[in-house]
Image: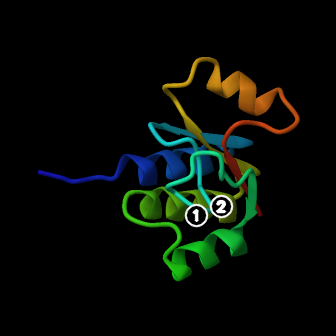
Amino acid sequence: RYNINADTVAGQIAISLQAEKLIYLSDVGGIFKDFEDPTSVISSLTINQAKDLIESGQIQKGMIPKVDSAIQALEGGVNKVHFLNGKRTHSILLELFTDSGIGTEIIP
């Protein structure tokens, strides 16, 4: 038996495909300044800012492997990674084709 993290696999596939973007869909709307406040989504982070949020404990639990795999993908050549709530109608379109987006993007 194997226990392979799907987020890690997605990041590695994005690197192998030389993907421009990687989009993670979950039941969480992105990375938050305050997880208890659903309006506090952080719209954009750099790799270093994301690492700082992990080290400070602001990013916790199941988001850590997601963000780690996003960082690996960015360091491997992917240009941008998005975290979106996949349960929200049209979430990908709202993120990619509006100025402010609805989730969190991480950039190099």
Q: Position of residue 72 (x, y in %)?
A: 58, 64
Element assignment for label 1: helix
Report the front residue among 17 and 56: 56
- The percent coordinates of residue 60 (x first, y second) are 43, 66
Q: Which mark is residue 76?
A: 2
What residue is at 52 percent from the left and 45 percent from the top? 13
Q: Nearer the viewer, residue 102 or 19?
A: 102
Labelled disc at residue 44: none
Which of label 2 and label 1 is nearer to you?
Answer: 1
Residue on which disc 1 sits? 72
**Can you say which quadrant of the picture contains the C terminus?**
bottom right
Q: Amino acid at mark 1?
A: Gln
Q: Mark 2 and 1 residues: CB-CB less than 8 Å, in contact? A: yes
Q: How many marks?
A: 2
- Secondary structure at badge 2 equals loop
Mark 2 is on which residue type?
Gly
Q: Position of residue 23 (x, y in %)?
A: 60, 39
